Amino acid sequence: MKNYALIIVCLFVIACNDNAATEEESSVASITAPANVNYEVVKVYPHDVTSYTQGLEWNGNKLIESTGNYGESILHILDTNMKQVGKKIELGNQYFGEGTTLFGGKIFQLTWKEHKVFVYDEKTLKLVNEFYWPYEGWGLTHNDTAIIVSTGSSNLYFVDPATFSIKKTLGVFNSSGYVNYINELEFANGKIYANIYEPNNIYTSDDIVVIDPISGQVSASMNLANILPKVNVMNDPRAINPGYVLNGIAYKKETNTFFVTGKCWPVMLELKLK
């Protein structure tokens, strides 16, 4: 009798494990693969090839650009013809500039490994505050209540603009698992748009992913691998430097278009998504 009871218990455990495995597989299978987003190029603008673009954001008809590289990092404002307006802010040689965003009349600028966030007055570009950031800094954007930070991982951090303290951490994933190397960010139409930069596979940087800010799921993806030849730029900037990848996304609400460029790219491209 004891043997029969033992066999029944074993069969029950196996059945439970099989059910759990089936449920887990079903859960993974239920994650929808990202949809493909198509685009058309509306206009091509010149872009300074010395600008190692790390962040872009429109403020009306003024485009905020943050650039990187030690000894070359700046923050400046461009007009609609991509010409600099007013002075530029030069970071010290010890700082590597990263993403930027405008919130509450202040421009925030990340640094890469220096754990520093600079805060400037929107109108004067005067430095008005600094914050400590515990991780690497990659991309910045914001929604109505929080600044959103990427660190090159699969996490996005929603922080308090007044203190830069973390309010929420969001893991980004698609149907294959977590999505790492999230870089420059843009919040537009209720979604987060992000560049991907994987140092060991620069060609993954041709994609812009669209992230649900509530769940973290990548709902769509746009591949820009052939965008430069489309606008008659035949020399791939990555042939000069592997780090000269697609980077920089700025949504212009007035025209419902996206502006994209790359690190030291010769052009800025205005896109209409389909």
Image (cartoon, rainbow, N blue to C red):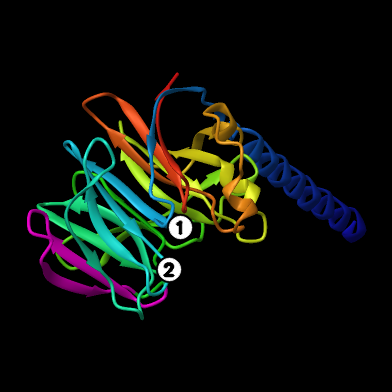
Left or right of 62, for residue 2? right
Percent coordinates x, y for residue 15 in the rendering: 78, 45
Q: Residues within 10 Å of mark 1 (few under 14, many from 20)?
A: many
Which three-letter amino acid code belongs to the residue tagged 1?
Asn
Evaluate if marks 2 and 1 touch, with contact meaning CB atoms under 8 Å apart. Answer: no
Between 12 and 177, the one nearer to me in the picture: 177
Residue bearing mark 1: 155
Q: Is residue 41 left or right of residue 33?
A: left
Q: Which residue is at a point 90% across and 53% down the rendered structure image? A: 4
Q: Which mark, by number, is residue 69?
A: 2
Circle 1 — which element? strand
Q: Which residues are magenta?
A: 113-133
Q: Quadrant of the C terminus?
A: top left
Tell me what residue is drawn at x 43 percent, y 43 percent.
261
Q: Quadrant of the N terminus?
A: bottom right
Q: In front: mark 2 or mark 1? A: 2
